[in-house]
Image (cartoon, helix red, strand yellow):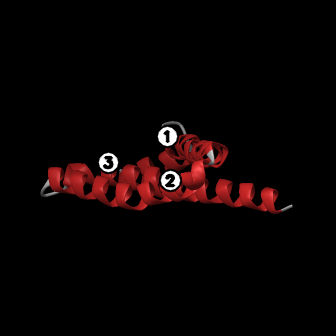
Amino acid sequence: MADVIRILLLIAGGTALGLFYYGGLWYTVRRLPGARNPALLTLGSLATRLAVCLPCFYLAARGGQWLRLLVFAAAFLAARQALTLYLGPGSRAAAARTVSEA
C-alpha cells in the first residue's frame, strides 16, 4: 500500500513540476515580444525553472531508485503533452486568446 501511495505522489509531483516548467516556458515566450530585455527574460526564466526542477528530479532519483525517476519523468512529460493540447494552436484557450488580443 505504501508503494502505491509513493507512486501516486511521484505522479502528482511530476505533473505539477511539468506544469510549472512548461507553463513558465509558455509564459516567457508569450512575454518576449514586449520585453525590454529579451535575453535577460529568457535567461532569468530558464535559471528559475531549472533551480526549481533540478532539485526535484534529484529528490525523485535519490537512493538509486530508477523506477521512481522514470515515473516522475513520465508524469513531467505527460504534463507537457497536456499543456500542448490545452494551449496549442487550434485549442479553445488559443482561440480565446486570439479573440481577446484583436
Residue underneath mark 1: 88
Identified by mark 3, the residue type is Val
Residue underneath mark 2: 57
Question: Please, what secondary structure does the residue beneath circle 2 have?
Answer: helix
Residue underneath mark 3: 29
Where's the N terminus, which quadrant? bottom right
Report the front residue among 76 and 64: 64
**Residue count near mark 2 (Cα–Cα under 10 Å), binned few <14, some 14–19, many ≥20:** some
Identity of the residue drawn at 60% across and 59% down: 13
Q: Are circles 1 and 3 on residues that touch, CB within 8 Å?
A: no
Q: Nearer the viewer, mark 1 or mark 3?
A: 3
Distance from disc 3 to disc 2, alpha carbons, whole Å, reads 24 Å
Residue farthest right in this picture: 1
Q: Nearer the viewer, mark 3 or mark 2?
A: 2
Side of 48 relative to 41 (left or right): right
Report the front residue among 90 and 18: 18
Q: Are circles 1 and 2 on residues that touch, CB within 8 Å?
A: no
Identified by mark 1, the residue type is Gly
Question: Please, what secondary structure does the residue beneath circle 3 have?
Answer: helix
Distance from disc 1 to disc 2, alpha carbons, whole Å, reads 26 Å
Tell me if residue 16 comes above or below residue 70 in the rendering: below
Tell me if residue 87 comes above or below residue 3 in the rendering: above
Side of 54 relative to 17 (left or right): left
The answer to which of marks 3 and 2 sits earlier in the sequence is: 3
Distance from disc 1 to disc 3, alpha carbons, whole Å, reads 13 Å
Q: Position of residue 80 (x, y in %)?
A: 53, 44
Residue 22 badge: none
Tell me if residue 92 comes above or below residue 31 in the rendering: above
Question: Please, what secondary structure does the residue beneath circle 1 have?
Answer: loop
